[in-house]
Amino acid sequence: MPCISRRRGCDMNIRTNPNRLRGFEKHAKVENLSRRSILKGLGVAGSFVLAAPVMTRQAFAYETGAGKMPHGVVVDPRVFVAIAPDGTVTILAHRSEMGTGVRTSLPLIVAEEMEADWSRVHVQQAHGDEVKFGNQDTDGSRSTRH
């Protein structure tokens, strides 16, 4: 039997004399756990695990700067991408090229997503029409983001 004191045959045995305990041992509580309480705890922990990805996705969903403009953001791809019967893909770039490489990156992105031949993807500059194309500002590296 464990003894707190180093003396042989001491009377401070934890099991036989619990009144002689020192410090935190007096506040330690051993409780029998039922199957029901364990299942409840697992259910609560499991719900947090399942809810964590949902909460993080909503936390990172934010409004873009273009969404606050008068005509907002156009998300319909048919406005920007056209496929000809011969397989040629034409992209309308609604923002201008100002050294950001959008004339190279847009065809690469579209060819990758459509599994099209990159040499048959062409870019044309769209005319100024914010109602049709949405915000056409070239600032903020928004050409490939939205």
Image (cartoon, rainbow, N blue to C red):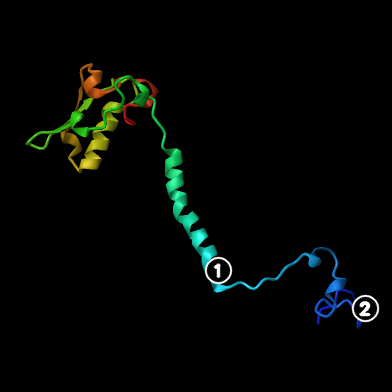
> Which residue occupies the foreground of this view, 130 or 18?
18
Q: Residue at x 58, y 73 (%)?
A: 34
Disc number lying in front (2 or 1): 1
Q: Secondary structure at mark 2?
A: loop
Q: Quadrant of residue 2?
A: bottom right
Query: Can you say whether 51 is above or below 134 in the image?
Result: below
Q: Residue at x 54, y 63 (%)?
A: 41
| Residue that label 1 marks | 38
Q: Residue at x 52, y 65 (%)?
A: 40
The spot of residue 45 in percent (x, y) is 52, 59
Q: Are marks 2 and 1 in contact (CB under 8 Å)?
A: no
The N terminus: image quadrant: bottom right
Query: Can you say whether 28 is above or below 69 in the image?
Result: below
| Residue that label 2 marks | 7
The amino acid type found where label 2 is placed reads Arg
Name the disc covering residue 80, or none. none
Return the disc, 2 or 1, that comes first in the chain's sequence: 2
The answer to whether 43 appears left or right of 136 in the picture is right
The answer to whether 99 appears left or right of 45 in the picture is left
The amino acid type found where label 1 is placed reads Ile
Query: Can you say whether 51 is above or below 64 in the image?
Result: below
The spot of residue 102 in percent (x, y) is 30, 27
The spot of residue 44 in percent (x, y) is 51, 59
> Which residue occupies the foreground of this view, 145 or 103?
145
> How would you rate the neighbour count of disc 1 (Cα within 10 Å): few for under 14, some for 14-19, many for 20 or more?
few
- Distance in Å between CA atoms under marks 2 and 1: 41 Å
